[in-house]
Image (cartoon, rainbow, N blue to C red):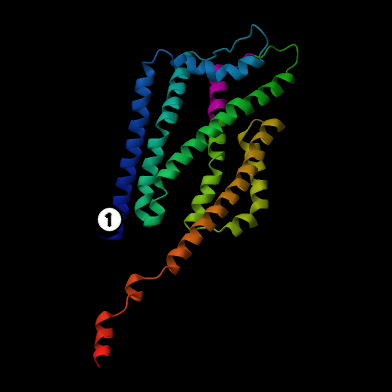
């Protein structure tokens, strides 16, 4: 098969994987759309903000079609989270053919681990970050102003923060994969630690709102997760290193077995 045919076959497979992922997300979304409790998901998302607003204050909708678009976006977000394991499995299915057998064994742990870590990042953002950030922002509002956030602007902010923190919590898994596949070493991860710390604060300043609290609540976990990734990668490297050494040092049955025919012939002579 020529290089051009191989490239085209990869593009076709990539298209098929993307279409399967899209069909899965929209299939789940179609089921959620007819669920009567879909609007309650937004109420749950808005709960951290509503707790900090003055009593009797509500969010507003400034756009004409905003009351329709907001439940639509909420449904898509919920559908993506529910279909995330299948989407990650499709991503792995596209990468797996180019990996060795021992690397393909990481498929199930990676799909499960990446899903759990992403959801853990979303939960950390919702239960910890939002409570601190919204209280911090409301404290600086002048008394002559009554905060009444727009529901679409608030939802876009929530989705951005969810994605940022969800991807942040994938750092240890990415480090383990890089070390396990031999792309980097644990020593290299330790050498670039200072650059990662600086990059964490830069990313936090870009992604989060322009306040110190939210930036620290993203940058500090990134640094801690990076350290956890180094420790986890080091443990896995030692485990598989010892396992490989044990397999290498094990006696080979074909080499250690005596040559019975040769021994019998020498005895007769």
234 falls in the magenta region: no
197 relative to 50, above or below: below
Which one is in front, 11 or 245? Answer: 245
The magenta segment is 148-160
The answer to whether residue 99 is left or right of residue 135 is left
**Residue name at image x 24 percent, y 88 percent:** 265
Q: Position of residue 153 (x, y in %)?
A: 56, 22
Q: Position of residue 137 (x, y in %)?
A: 70, 23
**Where, by quadrant of the figure, is residue 28 drawn?**
top left
Kindly identify which residue carries mark 1: 5
In this rendering, position of residue 43 left or right of residue 251: right
The reply to whether the magenta stretch includes residue 153 is yes
Whether residue 211 can be seen here: no
Q: Position of residue 80 (x, y in %)?
A: 43, 30
Quadrant in the picture for residue 269: bottom left
> Residue 163, position in %: x, y?
53, 33
At horizontal 54% and vertical 31% (from top left) the residue drawn is 122
Q: Nearer the viewer, residue 6 or 168?
A: 168
- The local secondary structure at tag 1 comes to helix
- Choose top left, top right, bottom left or bottom right for residue 130: top right
């Amino acid at each position: 098969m020529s290089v051009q045919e191989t490239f085209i076959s990869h593009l076709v497979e990539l298209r098929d994987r993307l279409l399967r992922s899209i069909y899965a997300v929209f299939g789940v979304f179609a089921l959620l759309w007819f669920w009567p409790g879909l609007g309650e998901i937004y109420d749950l998302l808005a709960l951290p903000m509503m707790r900090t607003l003055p009593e009797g204050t509500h969010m507003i909708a400034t756009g004409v079609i905003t009351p329709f678009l907001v439940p639509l976006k909420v449904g898509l977000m919920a559908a993506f989270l529910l279909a995330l394991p299948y989407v990650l499995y499709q991503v792995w299915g596209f990468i797996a053919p180019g990996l060795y057998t021992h690397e393909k064994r990481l498929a199930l742990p990676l799909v499960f681990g990446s899903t759990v870590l992403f959801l853990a990042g979303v939960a950390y953002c919702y239960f910890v970050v939002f409570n601190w950030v919204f209280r911090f922002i409301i404290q600086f509002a002048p008394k002559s102003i009554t905060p009444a956030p727009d529901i679409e602007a608030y939802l876009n902010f929530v989705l951005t923060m969810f994605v940022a923190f969800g991807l942040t919590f994938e750092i240890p898994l990415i480090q383990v994969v890089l070390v396990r596949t031999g792309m980097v070493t644990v020593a290299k991860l330790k050498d670039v630690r200072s650059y990662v710390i600086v990059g964490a604060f830069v990313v936090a300043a870009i992604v989060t709102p322009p306040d110190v609290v939210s930036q620290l609540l993203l940058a500090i976990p990134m640094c801690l997760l990076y350290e956890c990734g180094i420790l986890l990668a080091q443990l896995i490297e030692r485990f598989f290193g010892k396992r490989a050494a044990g397999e290498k040092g094990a006696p080979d049955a074909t080499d250690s077995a005596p040559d019975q025919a040769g021994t019998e012939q020498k005895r007769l002579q």
